[in-house]
Amino acid sequence: MLWTNAGRAAVAAILILAGTAPGWAAGLGFSAAVDLEITYTPIPPASYDMGSELGLTFAMPGFKLTSDTGFNLSGFAFERVEFEVDLGVAQIAESIRFEPNFNWNQLSFDLAIACVQVGVDWIFADIGIPPTPDYQMGVVLAVVCNTPVGLGVASATGFGATDLAAVLGGTAPFSEEALALFEHVAALCAPAPPPVPTILAGFVFEQEILRLTLSSVGLVASHTTWLDAGGLEQMGFELGYQLPAPGIGILAALLLDGTMTITHLDLILDVSVEGVRFTSWTEFAEPLFPVPVPILFAGQRFAVSFEVCEVRITSQTDFDDLFLFAGERIAIEATIPPVTFVSLTIFDAGGFAAQCIQARVAFSVVELTSAAEFAWDGLVFVSLGFSLAF
């Protein structure tokens, strides 16, 4: 309740300042936003749920506060509060979540000196199975140094915390950058929450990740090692070449387990020419049954994105391990001021699977939004919302 009351007080201050002294607030670099979204979700066979989410943002030089509060027909659903303080070479941030009971509290401190960045995250979380809470603590220490010559060194250490790859930019940083089209399509209608470490019981050493990266004269390479309390957990390698003009990237990403057995291999081709981007993603993975070779063909994906008359079209086609059709996603994005339209159509091996439609209309400081998603068996949800920024 402390953070909820603080959020309400911040909103009241925002409204007073915006209504009485807009010039003074603008001179301070003050900005704020209020977002409200109402969602209707049918529950088969004959019920439904309705939810609301209120988002509040307050920002001024060196400080930012955001709050998201959700309700449904059962009552309070969640509260998420974050604040950030920028002190120049140092940044302090805190994130607190109630869903609906206390779930997560993360306090972060980041320090940048020359090419070295040091970050410490203290996390206190409830990892129990409702309704029985189980409060545990974890600490993540990250050190990153990127030199002007293209060489990077990074380390992440978790005590009471694991799954630290996201702290260093993902399992394979160059590959994830090359696969941006797939990520864009996946998050177009349902943005995934940012990955966070997993908190485990007992404040003991859980995981260490060491990474070396190289990016020089078109050559990109990385080596990542995962260590746990038992020793070597897995290793990852990336090797490729990226040509800036025309944009051509060729990458191979390899994963090995603690016994130095290959478990995964990605081959990526990423080409960007005259506004058209094409990405090919070939996957090999360890088989589910014993065979003479460590990995087998696991799937093939293609993505292409291009613009026609200010309309961006992105298509993703997936094939399974037998190279049979597994899915298709077609995204259409168009902006004709003040209207922005987004459509995502999903097909699987059986035919039509889902359709998502979004529309936004912006008038000065006000933006109206609407979204709807349909599956083959009917409506999934409908939402309406507005955003006020000042």
Image (cartoon, rainbow, N blue to C red):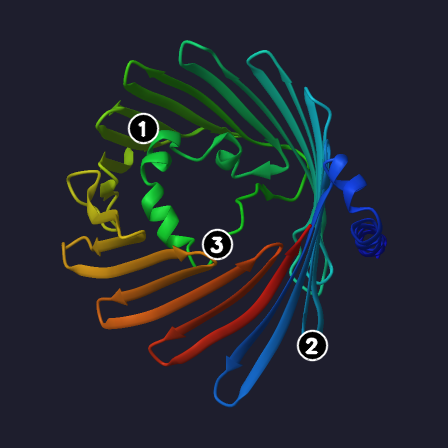
Residue 186 sits above or below residue 225 on the image: below
Seen at 59% across and 11% down, the residue is: 114
At a point 64% along the width and 37% down the height, the residue shown is 160
Residue 227 image offset from top left, x and y in percent: 48, 27
Q: Nearer the viewer, residue 111 or 23?
A: 23
Q: Quadrant of residue 387?
A: bottom right
> Seen in the image, is 228 located left or right of residue 93?
left
- What separation in Å lies between label 3 and label 1 (alpha carbons)? 35 Å
Q: Quadrant of the N terminus?
A: bottom right
Three-letter residue code for mark 2: Ser
Q: CA distance from mark 2 to mark 1?
A: 51 Å
Residue 15: x %, y % from top left? 80, 55
Contact check, label 3 and label 1, Cβ < 8 Å: no
Mark 3 to mark 2: distance in Å? Answer: 25 Å
Q: Which residue is mark 2?
A: 74
Q: Residue at x 73, y 24 (%)?
A: 87
